[in-house]
Amino acid sequence: MTPANGSTGPAAPEVPPDRATGGVAGPAGPAVPVQPGGPGGSDRVPDSTRDASAKKDYSEYGVAVLLLALGIWAIVDAMGLADAASARGPIGPKTVPIVVGLLLVAMAILLVVDVARGGRGEQEGGEDVDLSHGSDWRTIGLLAGAFAANALLIERIGWPLSGAILFFGTTYALGSRSYIRNVIISLIMSVGTWYLFYAGLGIKLPVGLLKGIL
């Protein structure tokens, strides 16, 4: 019997779509999935992915603006410092703040250029933190006490001793119990930083009880 459309052969059966794979099942083979961007597919980026990328761009630009503001503030504030009479050579009280400010400005510019060219910061891996435990208020309190003691004692006993108290208190708060070693290291750091500021930068930190010795 001749079909009504005039063809002489049997009509090809309709090929149903394969529901499991989203493709089209062939007459003699497995289903062929439809690829995005190809025939029957779509290359549209999901709105959630696009919004997340835009928010990330804004956050990275925000970091660059913050670095730029800090750098400009450091430079302007350093320019207002008075030159110390004991400053030697080109290094004075203004040197370090200006260098730090210039580095912050340079980092801000480089970050903007990198983000504009498509650079993206990698996400950090999840930290092994047990959120069921609360904050360690004892450690926080000890650290706050060490800083407060330094602020209260620096004018009375001087930085070499108050700085040693600060350094020793910090090591104790963080769990170190090597008392003799920590005392020696704390004294070396406090006296060393006092000489660094006094001889290197021309800034006289309070010497306190050690006046005439240092």
Image (cartoon, rainbow, N blue to C red):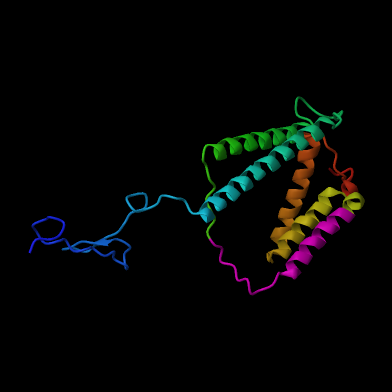
Query: Does 153 lie within the magenta span?
Result: no
Query: Does 129 lie within the magenta span?
Result: yes
Residue 66 visible (yes or no) = yes
Query: Image quarter for residue 28?
Result: bottom left
Q: Is residue 206 above or below residue 84?
A: below
Residue at 66% over, 74% down: 133
Q: Nearer the viewer, residue 10 or 65?
A: 10
Q: Nearer the viewer, residue 157 or 214?
A: 157
Residue 92 spot, x, y in % from top left: 79, 30
Residue 188 spot, x, y in % from top left: 73, 49
Give the magenta part as a residue range.
126-152
Outermost residue toward the front in this view? 4
Q: Nearer the viewer, residue 135 or 179?
A: 135
Residue at 54% over, 62% down: 126
Residue at 72% over, 37% down: 71
Outermost residue toward the right in this view? 156
Q: Quadrant of the N terminus?
A: bottom left
Q: Is 155 placed left or right of 196 in the picture? A: right
Outermost residue toward the bottom in this view? 132
Q: Nearer the viewer, residue 78 or 190?
A: 78
Q: Is residue 102 above or below residue 49?
A: above
Residue 158 spot, x, y in % from top left: 87, 49
Residue 93 visible (yes or no) = no
Q: Quadrant of the C terminus?
A: top right
- Total of numbered circles in the picture? 0
Query: Image quarter for residue 173?
Result: bottom right
Q: Is 21 placed left or right of 92 in the picture? A: left
Q: Is 136 placed left or right of 120 in the picture? A: right
Residue at 74% over, 54% down: 186
